[in-house]
């Protein structure tokens, strides 16, 4: 009878293998091959598929053969994710496309709940965790943190009203409801919020773009004309 420890038939391992052999009766003659080559039961460390064949020949000439097929796989499964990037803010629905190599088991959670790969439509911050485990027990884990923001920034302009004619200097004060890139022009020239002191007709354009790419645009038209310092047909002064 051939007895072997340290390796089992049709099993996959993620570590080195050292088969340990015993035979009953001990007088039997043992020979072994590994993938067709003589084998002396050294440690097996390289990845691959193996066939271990052990033959025991008794003193009576009877032969007993044991065949064990096994695999060594130390490589963690590869996870491929498309349709999403870690740390990004989106202004649209998000549909992660997750694939793993054949044979690996996959577990996906979204904010701690099991996720079925459906479109993610609600605004908010998300943590997507993907784990893949192959038959050998090798594990890969990837984490994606992202945010969905479909709301355009709110722009407020104080100090000037669309359509109004002013008889004094004007100083627009522009504020944005969130961290956004703000671009302003006055009559198509770059404007930095300074006081407007000259007479004339003006068009103030404000564009705010947030990190998700949502855009708010405002356009205000106004004019400035200062009161005249002299009057027409002044009354003559007496001598």
Image (tube, rainbow, N blue to C red):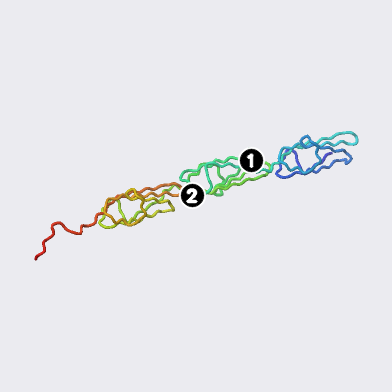
Q: Secondary structure at mark 1?
A: loop
Of the pair 221 and 79, the residue shown nearer to us: 221
Q: Which residue is mark 2?
A: 124
Alpha carbon of mark 2 to alpha carbon of mark 1: how far?
Answer: 31 Å
Q: Quadrant of the N terminus?
A: top right
Q: Nearer the viewer, residue 54 or 199?
A: 199
Q: Nearer the viewer, residue 127 or 230?
A: 230
Is label 2 in a helix, a strand or a loop? strand
Q: Position of residue 145 (x, y in %)?
A: 53, 49
- Furthest residue in direction left, as rendered: 239
Q: Residues within 10 Å of mark 1 (few under 14, many from 20)?
A: many
Q: Position of residue 237 (x, y in %)?
A: 11, 64
Q: Total number of numbered labels?
A: 2
Q: Which mark is residue 104?
A: 1
Relative horizontal placement of residue 230, taking residue 27 as reference (left or right)? left
Do the numbered discs 2 and 1 sit on residues whose CB atoms are within 8 Å? no
């Amino acid at each position: 009878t051939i007895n072997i420890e340290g390796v089992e038939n049709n099993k996959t391992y993620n570590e080195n293998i050292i088969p340990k052999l015993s035979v009953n009766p001990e007088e039997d003659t043992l020979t072994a091959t590994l993938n067709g080559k003589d084998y002396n039961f050294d440690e097996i460390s390289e990845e691959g598929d193996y066939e271990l064949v052990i033959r025991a020949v008794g003193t009576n000439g009877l032969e007993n053969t044991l065949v064990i097929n096994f695999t060594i796989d130390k490589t963690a499964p590869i996870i491929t994710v498309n349709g999403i990037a870690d740390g990004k803010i989106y202004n649209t629905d998000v549909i992660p496309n997750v694939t793993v190599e054949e044979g690996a088991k996959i577990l996906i959670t979204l904010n701690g709940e099991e996720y079925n790969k459906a479109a993610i439509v609600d605004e908010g911050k998300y943590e997507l965790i993907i784990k893949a485990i192959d038959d050998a027990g090798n594990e890969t884990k990837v984490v994606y943190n992202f945010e969905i923001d479909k709301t355009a920034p709110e722009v407020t302009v104080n100090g000037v009203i669309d359509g109004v004619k002013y008889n004094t200097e004007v100083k627009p004060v522009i504020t944005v409801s969130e961290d956004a890139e703000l671009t302003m022009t006055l009559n198509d020239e770059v404007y930095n919020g300074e006081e407007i002191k000259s007479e004339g007709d003006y068009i103030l354009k404000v564009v705010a773009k947030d990190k998700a790419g949502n855009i708010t645009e405002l356009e205000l038209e106004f004019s400035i004309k200062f009161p005249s310092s002299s009057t027409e047909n002044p009354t003559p002064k007496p001598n």
